Image (cartoon, rainbow, N blue to C red):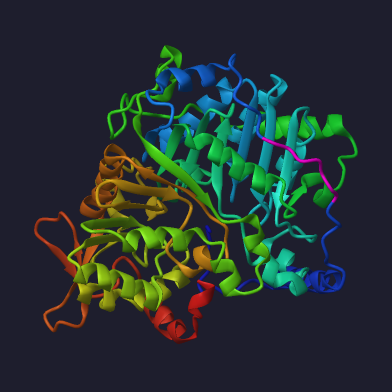
Amino acid sequence: MTCRHRSILQMPSMRTLARLLVVLVESALVAACGTLPPQVEQPPSRALAPAPDSPLVRIARDSTTISSMSGFRLMPQAYYSLDVRIEVARRATHSLDVQYYLIQNDRSGRLLMRTLRDAALRGVRVRLLVDDLNTVGGDPMFHGLATFPNVEVRLFNPFCCVRESVASRFAASLGDFRRLNHRMHNKLFIADGAIAVMGGRNIADEYFARSASNNFVDMDVLVVGSVVPQLATIFDTYWNSPQAYPVDAILGKTADIDEGRRNFNHLVDDGDQMMSVKMQPIDILGHRPISGEFDAGYLELVWGTATAIADQPGKVMATSVEQARSMSVQMNIMDRVAESTREVVISSPYFVPGAEGVEAFTDLRRRGVRVVILTNSLAANDVPVVHIGYARYRVALLRTGVKLYELSPSGVHHNDLAMLPTMSLGRLHAKAAVIDENMVYIGSMNLDPRSESTNTELGIVVRCPELAREVSSVIDASAQRSSYELRFGPDGNSLQWLLVGTRPEVLLSSEPEVTPFVQFRDMLLAPFVPEKLL
């Protein structure tokens, strides 16, 4: 979740206080009747079968070597990842099934929405499912897209009303907080039932290196082959679930469809969102921009066997941690990690292993398994309270011999992988694991309590040594070029941060790249942060 924080030393103005008071009063008045409208029964909608006349279907078929296998193109660089989504959508001829935790009303979000509209106008069936937590400011965009033919838009686990801000939404639904605290964290994009894009990235400027201030170091993958129908089935399960509401059921019917379309067109057609995406001739893994391969009718991929895994959409309605855990992807992945015999390499931006996780990693180390974990430093973490939960376990993990790396937000610019705007800070967002140099997990799941028992998650588990090498090299590039390696100080108890790759060595004895005030704030908050809510 992307959060913006204000120092408690910055006092709001009287005008801000007055506006806040009005919102609170209005929300309190609405809270008494803040309930969702009854869900209207919808006829089941299913993924369209891949059509032989689809260019994307032909390309996927002609690129496939063994029908029982799946092909993968890892996309660690932001510009290439955005370009793939747009190119795939522009070439779709039958269907686009799109599912995201966040689609921001910014340049990247409007670019995707424009591309979906254009596809619908070509006769492509578009189904868009977006979690309702971060749709603040985006209602006109989602409502407007739904006015076009061939488009359906649904909001997952929606708020009922008072939609001006996240705070007002929760305030108007206080009696429904348990449900609304659970969110759909999935990210999935399927074109013509033949090509999918999935992984860690949401749709917003900061996920595609287009933000001037903060950008995420992330990872996702283009997929073809036998695992794509599995992903399509997962999409259908969410689309047809009781938690997915037609956008009109929440926002009301558009009074004037023509005006709704004009407003949408003005939103997505004007401005600089259509500026071309700047890319190098080849990416860090040696791939050209995808358009050339689409034009040639053949994709350069690595091949393996894969299984798609996802939480059940009903996880957002779970009334206990135990019930939610029974529907959790995380438990599945940790079972595989625990079976490792040689090496585990993990990238998890929000990493709160808990006592059980520490025990699992301790057992791996006892058996001689090498364990490398890359996560965010306090300075890089966009949800600092999560860092409090992680910091509780650093010493215990280091004592077992686990290698811990924390991303440096300023050091990211020393890594060719990132290619972020010069003045922006980098934050880790890639969620991946490599087990024994053969098995790979890529998806939306963090190793933290929220992924385990609160949010729904989606991922794929792949057996493919080539993909494993690529994912490991990407994680290693961040660890070795733009991170701090944690170690014990001379006393054997205190922590030190070594900025990797610097000559002479840069060795720090306190949380790097943050002010003393931030460290003091976290020290005060630490005893009061309940781990199960992180």
Q: In the rendered view, does 115 fall on the left or right side of 168? A: left
Is residue 453 highlighted in magenta? no
| Residue 282 shows in the view | yes
Which image quadrant for residue 115? top right
Q: Is residue 285 left or right of residue 311?
A: left
Measured as percent of width and height from the top left, residue 259 is found at: 84, 32
- Front in this rendered view, residue 412 or 306: 306
Say above or below: 248 vs 340.
above
- Which of the two residues, 379 or 103, is positioned nearer the viewer here? 103
- The magenta region covers 40-46
Using the rendered view, name the quadrant where residue 369 is placed. bottom left
Residue 443, how many percent across, how many down?
46, 49
Residue 291 lies, with reference to residue 37, above or below; the image says above
Q: Main secondary structure of the magenta part?
A: loop
Residue 219's place in the image compared with 503, above or below, is: above
- Using the image as rendered, state which of residue 379 and residue 100 is in the foreground: 100
Q: Please give the name of the residue rendered at 37% of the width and 67% of the height, measured from the top-left corner.
A: 378
- Residue 18 visible in the displayed image: no
